[in-house]
Amino acid sequence: MDVKKIRKDFPILNQKIHGKPLVYLDSAATSQKPASVIEALSQYYESMNANIYRGIYALSEEATQAFEATRKKVAQFMGAKEERSILFTNNTTEAINLVAASWGRKNVKAGDEILLTQMEHHSNIVPWQLLAQSQGATLKYIPLTSDGQLDLSSLDSLLSDRTKILAVTHMSNVLGTINPIKELVANAHPKGILVLVDGAQAIPHFKIDVSDLDCDFYAFSAHKMLGPTGVGVLYGKPNILESMPPFLGGGEMILEVYADYATWKPLPYKFEAGTPNIGSVIAFVKAMEYLEKVGMDEIRAHEKEITRHALLALQELEGITIFGPKDVEVKGGVVSFALADIHPHDLGQLLDQEGIAIRAGHHCAQPLMRVLNVPATARASFYLYTTISEVDFLVETLKKARRYFYRGF
Amino acid sequence: MAFEALDDLYREVILDHFKNPRNHAPLSAFDVEQEGYNPLCGDQIKLQLQFENGRVVKIGFMGKGCSISQASASILTEEIQGKSISEIEEEIQFFKSMMQGEANVEDQDVGDLEALSGVRKFPVRIKCALLGWTTLEEALTFYQEKTKGA
């Protein structure tokens, strides 16, 4: 994998920030986009823009075909056997809300339990809280080990006869922990418990095969995997999706509408009400093609190398605390840390001055921050365009930041 | 080094208040207690105030957060010591207008408060600087409601 060559495909990496080259270490928030995606997006608006599924004219037909070509590509990219398993949403959050609202209200009753983990993003907590409140159900959480992995010692009792669904992240956006989805599914399914996987941090970075994982739902966003913002995907097993009522009602999702009732289109259209983000869905195909061209295994290997290097270099810093596993076999390219008593927000401000973009805050994971007993963390996250020298520059700049912050003390 | 561009934000006075926060201990007795939270960076502030004859005689603050939020709260505890409610309200208004760039701090003797005027150039951090002051404002409202009926 030639990172130098890859970087040339990402126009934004030529940017200067405060006069310094951009060192973008916030890909877990959103990835940068290659020229092919940006061009596809503008090409759509320049030469293909029309609404889909309705026009009896060439442009609309072309846009519809391109839109459906992305669905086909997503299915192949993630190992889904049927295209009707692939629903387009606005983002991961909406995909999870779809399941919580549609499947949840139909299947979760008073006294039932919903099992989450202590490392979930708010988008995989709050939709379940809303469901639990409306149904009178209870939320349970799988605890963490001291190094930030799931503590599965009590899994058997947490997957109780009241549990209806386990909603778990494939990879933590804070700790980088990669969770053993197959093992979780193998424990949940015999008890009739469904499994939803929040794959927002996983599918951009390593090969996913939902048929092999055997999970019931898998949600992710295009914008974290080189695609445009405003496109989310929900994969669901077709028989489960078919049993679910619509999430949003409106245009596109209906077959016939009468004064007091309507009938629905078949999958996947039943769940795609209103005009979708057509241009971005169409451009998303270029992102998946780019990732496949580079190779998901190559990307994972590169990120392992970067992460291993970052962990070693950061550990040398005086006053550093690194959260999450240190073993790159169970950790993706996300490193959260604290440096002495410098607040992450202050660190972020200092690093920005040198052109380095990191995330500082609670990362939409406040329950996890409480488990870690910190108000916030600093987080550097990597992708296929991240270089070893960028990581070294981060570490050098952290040293400088520490000296600056402690000047006169 | 490039960090010099941030010298106006991270003045020595601010770093000193951050590292040695004043009145940074819970009070054994207080008339009002108020918590403030800034979800953007996770800054937390808890203020406790004790009044005597309408004036603040003791103040305690606890909190976790960025240097700007914690230093601003520390400076606040020194600023309002011994002041009446109306004086404190004036102080809050002054601080808010200073953050909005309306009050002219250069002509006034405002002590350590002046050090926070540099925050104005960093719009993202204004919320951090304001947290202690908005928490104080809520504490006063709460205290006044509580004592009205008494």
Image (tube, coloured by chain):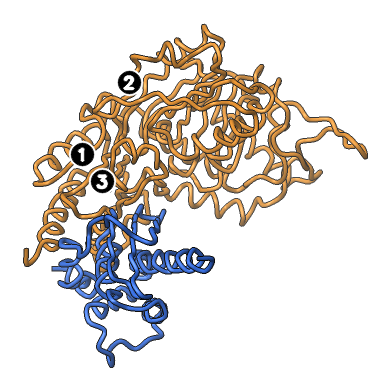
Please tell me whether mark 2 or mark 1 is closer to you in this view. 2
Q: Is residue B48 left or right of residue A309?
A: right
Give the distance between the C-alpha atoms of the residues marked 2 and 3, in whole angstroms.
40 Å
* Residue B39 position within the rendered picture, expressed as x and y whole percent measured from the top left: 41, 53
Residue, x 31% and y 48% (percent of image)?
A376
Q: Is residue B128 left or right of residue A308?
A: right
Q: Chain of mark 3?
A: A
Q: Nearer the viewer, residue A315 or A27?
A: A315
Amino acid marked by disc 2: Asp
Q: Nearer the viewer, residue B104 or A361?
A: B104
- In the image, residue A117 above or below residue B49: above
Residue, x 43% and y 26% (percent of image)?
A141
Pick whichever of labels 2 and 3 is earlier in the sequence.
Answer: 3
Give the distance between the C-alpha atoms of the residues marked 2 and 1, in whole angstroms.
19 Å
Indicate the secondary structure of the residue bearing disc 3.
Answer: helix
Q: Is residue A196 left or right of residue B79?
A: right
Give the labeled residue for mark 2. A151
Q: Which shade of the palette goes to chain A?
A: orange
Give the labeled residue for mark 3. A4
Give the distance between the C-alpha atoms of the residues marked 1 and 3, in whole angstroms.
29 Å
Are the numbered discs 1 and 3 placed on the same chain, yes or no? yes
* Residue A214 position within the rendered picture, expressed as x and y whole percent measured from the top left: 50, 15
- In the image, residue A71 above or below residue A357: above
Give the labeled residue for mark 1. A322
Q: Which shade of the palette goes to chain B?
A: blue
Amino acid marked by disc 1: Ile
Q: Nearer the viewer, residue A118 or B141?
A: B141
